[in-house]
Image (cartoon, grey):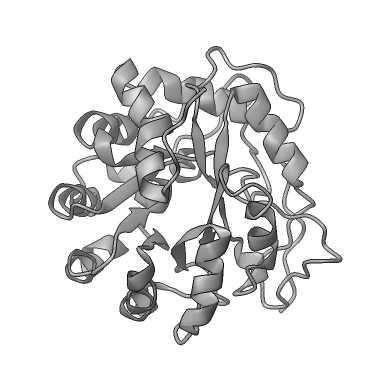
């Protein structure tokens, strides 16, 4: 496969947010792409990112006030979790990982990843070089003994409808990446969003990430000024009002695969703050829900 042209890098020159996040905040969705000579990319990857260093990710955290993070293993590395494993092992109290594992992965390998700080496996329906929702039951059987959950990055929001029964019966916890990847033009009364809400209501170990809404918006980005993604606001507010105990937050840094309209991470954070209904919900979204989901110790200053 010939990878596409190199996507855009993240914005690194960041101002301070209008309000720093609470102490102990956990960024639950991000990736690093660096040390390319040590961690080679998979030949069948869908895109070839620019170098996006761990130092840059942590500097963004410093500006925001973020204390901890979850590295979600990038698809460009296929099932080789080395870059994520080596990084999260540098500070196991501060970092967790989400792995890419294949059906048939030996339990001893999963145990090694667990000992390193991985707490979930990822299914991605967009990419040909990883596990997908067709592997749901096989991956669930592999990770159940370790107390892991499965994080799902769906291809199309409407796919939730056909998956609902399988997801409801899944014996491990589930996390829906990026607000379920439901597009803004479907509206909060769509059947696909109803499926997500039923799962959040009826399956007690189901979660959703408030992240990457800029990818799902169908409102054109303005030529000047900060994008407000008004079609995504009702989704976020519905989740944060009616399902706040099941919501976690992630930056999706460095916004991989984008060739235009790279968002400013501080603008995204400032916008999200206007969607959160109250300080109790804010604490749950940024800190306590993620502590429970990923097994972090309660934060103490």
Outermost left residue: 202
Say whether residue 119 is visible.
Answer: yes
Q: Position of residue 178 (x, y in %)?
A: 43, 47
Q: In the rendered view, tell whether residue 129 sits above or below residue 157.
A: below
Q: Position of residue 231 (x, y in %)?
A: 37, 33
Left or right of 136? Residue 100 is right
Say whether residue 231 is visible.
Answer: no
Q: Residue at x 23, y 69 (%)?
A: 171
Outermost bottom residue: 104
Callout count? 0
Q: Position of residue 18 (x, y in %)?
A: 55, 12
Q: Residue at x 57, y 21 (%)?
A: 226
Q: Residue at x 46, y 64 (%)?
A: 122
Pick the front one: 130 or 93? 93
Left or right of 212? Residue 39 is right
Q: Residue at x 54, y 17 (%)?
A: 20
Q: In the rendered view, tell whether residue 130 sits above or below residue 218.
A: below
Outermost right residue: 37
Pick the front one: 220 or 114? 114
- Image quadrant in which the N terminus is located: bottom right
Q: In the rendered view, tell whether residue 150 sits above or below residue 166.
A: above
Pick the front one: 136 or 164? 136
Q: Position of residue 291 (x, y in %)?
A: 40, 40
Left or right of 31? Residue 298 is left
């Amino acid at each position: 496969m010939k990878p596409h042209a190199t996507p855009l890098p993240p914005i690194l020159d960041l101002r301070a947010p209008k309000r720093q996040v609470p102490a102990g905040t956990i960024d639950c969705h991000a990736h690093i792409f660096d040390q390319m000579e040590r961690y080679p990319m998979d030949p069948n990857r869908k895109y070839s990112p620019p170098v996006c260093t761990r130092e840059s990710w942590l500097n963004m955290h410093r500006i925001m006030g973020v204390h901890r993070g979850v590295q979600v293993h990038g698809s460009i590395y296929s099932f080789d979790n080395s870059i994520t494993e080596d990084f999260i092992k540098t500070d196991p109290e501060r970092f967790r990982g989400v792995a890419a594992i294949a059906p048939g992965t030996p339990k001893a390998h999963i145990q090694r990843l667990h000992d390193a700080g991985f707490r979930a496996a990822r299914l991605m329906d967009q990419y040909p070089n990883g596990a997908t929702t067709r592997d749901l039951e096989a991956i669930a059987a592999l990770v159940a003994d370790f107390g892991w959950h499965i994080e799902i990055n769906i291809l199309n929001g409407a796919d939730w409808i056909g998956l609902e029964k399988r997801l409801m019966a899944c014996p491990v916890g589930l996390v829906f990446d990026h607000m379920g990847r439901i597009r803004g033009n479907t509206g909060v009364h769509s059947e696909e969003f109803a499926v997500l809400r039923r799962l959040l209501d009826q399956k007690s170990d189901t979660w959703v990430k408030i992240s990457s809404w800029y990818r799902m918006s169908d409102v054109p980005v303005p030529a000047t000024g900060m994008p407000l993604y008004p079609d995504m606001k009702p989704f976020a507010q519905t989740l944060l009002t009616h399902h706040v105990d099941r919501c976690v937050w992630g930056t999706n840094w460095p916004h991989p695969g984008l060739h235009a309209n790279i968002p400013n991470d501080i603008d995204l954070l400032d916008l999200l703050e206007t969607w959160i209904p109250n300080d109790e919900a804010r604490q749950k979204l940024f800190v306590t829900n993620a502590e429970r989901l990923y097994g972090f110790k309660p934060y103490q200053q």
